[in-house]
Image (cartoon, helix red, strand yellow):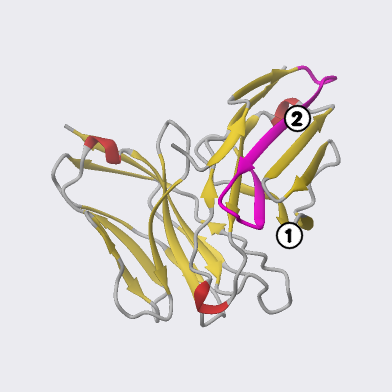
Amino acid sequence: AQTVTQSQPEMSVQEAETVTLSCTYDTSESDYYLFWYKQPPSRQMILVIRQEAYKQQNATENRFSVNFQKAAKSFSLKISDSQLGDAAMYFCAYRSSNYYSAGGTSYGKLTFGQGTILTVHP
Amino acid sequence: DTEVTQTPKHLVMGMTNKKSLKCEQHMGHRAMYWYKQKAKKPPELMFVYSYEKLSINESVPSRFSPECPNSSLLNLHLHALQPEDSALYLCASSPISGGRKSNQPQHFGDGTRLSIL
């Protein structure tokens, strides 16, 4: 079974500064997807960024970028030019590449880390 | 605006009540999910529906009864709940595909905040 670990329960950053949230995972699969979701107090889970394991290039979405180290099974999220609206709980998540993975029991399941609460100070 | 709509947004019910949570999406996704989320914790998967059939039941107590009447709608029927069932219930949907075309993420609704008295 896959596991996802976020070792930072809480992080804080000054507005306009850069912060990095860490995520490590464990899997025996070679092809999979990794996601960062953001959940503000408004509670909707919002996709921030995704990474395909077969792609060596790190994904970027505006101020958000990842450092994907497949051999190390590490998937950190960097937020540049932090804004007050970035304050939220951030979840790292893993998903097998096949909806019906080996054994037929994946069904698109997401495995979440425990989350990191990000506070942005003005 | 969220593409997955959940109603109601808040629900308070007694332990003997029967109520239902509703989730609707019109993105053509054929996989739908129910999650339970406690405060400051990650979502916990409860059920997965694929092509309107129950694919995964993560050992959820029978007082939670899911239903998928069509490809756009997912219900969660509640009966005789316990105080520990108070939580945020999230619905999500995603396409069903395999291999390197399956990079589409799950889309989440805003959730229903459930309180059991």
The range drawn in magenta is B14-35
Q: Residue at x 68, y 73 (%)?
A: A100
Dots 2 and 1 on the same chain: yes
Residue drawn at (37%, 66%) of the image:
A75
Task: Provide residue B44's location: percent of width, then percent of height.
Answer: 63, 48
The tag on residue B51 is 1
Establish if A70 lies above or below B48.
below
Q: How crowded is mark 1: few (under 14 residues within 10 Å), some or many (20 or more)?
A: some
Q: What residue type is labelled 2?
A: Ser
Give amino acid for label 1. Tyr
Q: Residue at x 79, y 57 (%)?
A: B53
- Quadrant containing the N terminus of chain A is bottom right
Q: In this view, does B38 lie to the left or right of A16?
A: right
Disc 2 packing (10 Å; few <14; some 14–19; many ≥20): some
Q: Please give the count of numbered marks on the rendered protein.
A: 2
The chain that hosts pointer 1 is B
* Element marked by disc 1: loop
Along the horizontal axis of the image, is B28 left or right of B21? left
Relative to B81, residue A87 above or below: below
Label 2–label 1 contact, CB within 8 A: no
Quarter of the figure that contains the C terminus of chain A = top left
Q: Where is residue A60 in the image (x, y as percent from the top left)?
A: 27, 63
Query: In the image, A39: left or right of A122?
Result: right
Residue, disc 2: B20
Q: Please report whichever mark, 2 or 1, sits nearer to the chain's N-terminal start.
A: 2
Viewer-nearest residue: A77 or A55: A55
Decide which of B15, A107 is in the foreground and name it. Answer: A107
Depth check, front residue: B34 or A94: B34
Mark in the foreground, 2 or 1? 1
Location of residue B2 with respect to B49 vertically, above or below: above
